[in-house]
Image (spheres, rainbow, N blue to C red):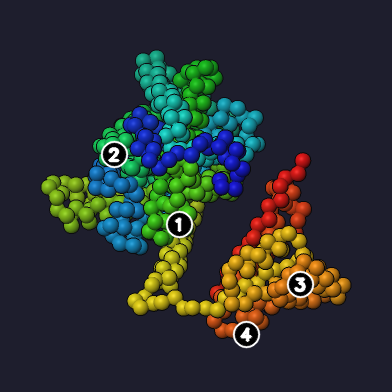
Amino acid sequence: MALLPSALKRFLIGEPIASSEDQHHRLPKKIALPVFASDAISSTAYATEEILIVFLSLAGVGIAAFKNLVPISILVILLLIIVVSSYRQTIYAYPKGGGSYIVARENLGKHPSLVAGASMLVDYILTVAVSVAAGVAAIVSAFSGLAPYRVELCVGFIILVTLANLRGIKESGALFAPPTYLYILSLASLILVGLYRVYFQDLGPIDHSSVVAIELLEGQKSLTIFFFLKAFSSGAVALTGIEAVADGVPAFEKPEPKNAAKTLMWMAVILGTSFFGLSLLAQKLQPLKDHEGNIKVTVMAQMAEQVYGGRNIFFFVTQFATFGILILAANTAYADFPRLSSIIARDKFLPRQLANRGDRLVFSNGILFLGTAASGLVIAFGGIVNALIPLYAVGVFTGFTLSQFGMLVRHRKLKEQGWQVRAFFSGVGSLTTFFVASIVVVVKFTDGAWIPAIVIPSMMFIFVSINRHYNYVRSFLKIEEGYVAPRHTHLVIVLVGSVNKGVLQAVKYAESLRPDKLLALSVVGSPDERAKLETDWAKHNLTIELDMITDEYRDITDSVLRRINELDDETSDDVITVVIPEFVTSFRSKWLHNQSALLIKAKLLNRPNTVVTSVPIVIPKHT
């Protein structure tokens, strides 16, 4: 954002916030719930759909698919209870945030922590891509004419959410809270009205008359354990976002752990009851969905249309609420990705820029990187949700597993009061989530689960490489005992193009440095240029030595570098300062001037014992 003109930057992200104001920008629970729980709660909009895609379209079991919805939802809810119990412990044990990464770092060591960090960063990028793609799918279900613009809509909404988060976590949370609560109310309404009509008004299944729908319902294959596990792993994406609260504890109002733990429990209750209610309603209404996209209307839209008796006001409220929560579910990732990447950056495994807070007390570089990566993913996969889901679950459950196993190790090490019970839950949780992660990799490997299985180790390699660089730089710069900085002779070279005010100012500045040797250096292209420069030099009584190089090929940069090397060879301990008169004009007229100074500075930057100084000559804007 530093490249934006100041006025535009202020308009887009607001006035800067002082560091001392940090406490006033913490989140109360009512705002923290939509910020950190929108991802998990929003997964109810597509988790049931993903289960049906596996059963109907891939397994081909036909009407029998609906009998397995409720059993799978119960398994997912049991898994939810285990994971939430473990993360509640993490909140109190590590109130400074960081979630899986911090737990693994403190209890399992460097490499497991890097696996956890890479897994969660990948998960957050996918959270944005999947949530926004699913939100656009909800709108396309209501307005089919928008289908050709699916990718453009996805990228546009990612940009909007990115800008909102650059304004600050509290501002974005207040902005996103109403749509989250609207979705919770519309979801509750859909489930309660739907189940009432099913059980008390004999509301029947949805009428499916298309060729594709008939083929899906007439499937007669036996359900194999492979496809059951594949459907379960698809439904388990409902747990994505559970770790967000543990990652973002420092963003809560004081007492941070207590408020974060309450928010986590609210999220679990809303998610568990909603997911079970939707699965039960889907079992009765029998909505359809195929993996090839022939049925374009989402499962939620089909159920809303059936429950409310058509595409009326209640249907559209449900669709817009679904669209809103899914778009804003990306906000969970925007709250946690920058914070987690800042922690990893402080540990020197990511670029230091990610650890810096921006004007609005948010980690702006992390927010911008997240938005860019998610946009690239949406473009690569055409904005299709079920193409992204297999990538989603691997990182989620890898992070879950390492976090819970890390907590198990911590309990056994510290043996605090009641540690046995907590260790039991952590142990069972780590085994369960490891089992789910293994299932996802195996049963969805060819569907795209191989991508994170390669990306996560690749990110670990990047982490280690970055860390090795920072350690090398630190060891190089470390002051050893008895070290004294050597005394160097000082050679100052003023670069000259022609004799003008800028050159005169640069010469005066160079003289003030009191160097051991001072000379001016110029590259000319012909004898005539040489003669003119000599005449002008004498005319203005410039007494310092003028060294001119004739280069008929007009290669100024290389000629200057060659001459500097020659001068440097004359004295072995020279420190060379190159003084460059540089004209500074207005932004709109900068392109009218050649930028040879930039090229020379770029080349000299990597030259040892060389200092480059620009003497700016500011040209006022003319009217």
Q: Nearer the viewer, mark 1 or mark 4?
A: 4
**Residue lying at 19% horizontally and 47% vertically, measured from the top left:** 422
Which comes sooner in the sequence, label 4 or label 3? 3
Q: CA distance from mark 1 to mark 4?
A: 39 Å
**Residue lying at 64% horizontally and 36% vertically, measured from the top left:** 149
Residue 293 position, x and y percent, is: 57, 39
Q: Nearer the viewer, mark 1 or mark 3?
A: 3
Residue at which label 4 appears: 570
**Three-letter amino acid code at the position of disc 4:** Glu
**Three-letter amino acid code at the position of disc 1:** Arg
Q: CA distance from mark 4 to mark 3?
A: 20 Å
Q: Nearer the viewer, mark 2 or mark 3?
A: 3
On the question of residue 461 being in view, the answer is: no
Crowd tier of the residue under label 4, counting other residues whose Cα lies within 10 Å: few below 14, some 14–19, many 20 or above: few
Residue at which label 2 appears: 256
Q: Say whether residue 404 is left or right of residue 134.
A: left
Residue at which label 1 appears: 352
Q: CA distance from mark 1 to mark 3?
A: 40 Å
Asked which secondary structure carries label 3, the reply is: strand
Crowd tier of the residue under label 2, counting other residues whose Cα lies within 10 Å: few below 14, some 14–19, many 20 or above: many
Residue at which label 3 appears: 523
Say if 337 sits above or below 114 in the image.
above
Which comes sooner in the sequence, label 1 or label 4? 1
**Residue lying at 19% horizontally and 50% vertically, measured from the top left:** 423
Asked which secondary structure carries label 2, the reply is: helix
